[in-house]
Image: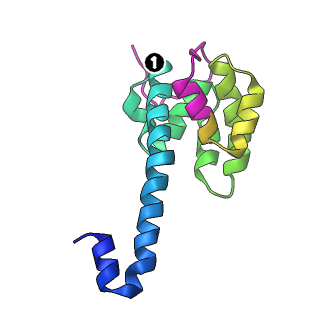
Amino acid sequence: MTVEALATQYPFLQPLSWYVTVFNTMFIVFFIPTAIAWWRLHEKAGRPGWTGLIPFYNLIVLSRIAGTPYWQGVLCMLSFTAPIGCLFLMPKLARSFGLNPAIGYLSALLPPLIFIVIGFGPAEYVGQKGPVEHPHVHKLA
């Protein structure tokens, strides 16, 4: 039985039908392209694409890609420090893909922006801007 059928049979479930429809639409429109962009961003940097899909770990690997200390990725994980962490991490990430750091500062306000720009755009990984070694994050041979 679908949500719409339940909503017609039980009128008090009608708001739930609207919520499910909006949630599924937003999921398709926003999350799926961002997840694909994460995968492509990590592959462009020479990392396995699946590392972009693991929550929390992807930010540690992202800090390695950008050449920043891992704690900047950790700052992006915590809700109360995420804007500060993004202000540190995103401009360096943009520079490591040859983009203007201004895009990184803009994406600190809207983080999925930089992932979509790098993942689907022509940007190529040019290397870390500031070598920082992370011994706990895998290295590619």
Residue 103 position, x and y percent, is 72, 30
Q: Based on the displayed image, in which of its 4 quarters is residue 133 positioned? A: top right
Q: Based on the displayed image, in which of its 4 quarters is residue 48 positioned? A: top left
Q: Is residue 50 left or right of residue 119?
A: left
Residue 82 position, x and y percent, is 66, 50
Q: Based on the displayed image, in which of its 4 quarters is residue 39 positioned? A: top left
User: For residue 12: magenta?
Assistant: no
Residue at the image point whose x is 57% and y is 33% from the top? 115
Residue at the image point whose x is 34% and y is 79% from the top? 7
Decide which of 36, 55 is in the foreground and name it.
36
Residue at the image point whose x is 58% and y is 49% from the top? 77
Query: From this viewpoint, is residue 136 visible?
Result: no
Quadrant in which the N terminus is drawn:
bottom left
Residues packed near mark 1 inside 10 Å, few (<14), some (14 to 19) or many (20 plus): few
Decide which of 5, 67 is in the foreground and name it.
5
Decide which of 134, 96 is in the foreground and name it.
96
> Residue at label 1?
46
SS majority, magenta: loop
Residue 40 position, x and y percent, is 46, 26
Please, what is the three-letter code of the amino acid marked with disc 1?
A: Gly
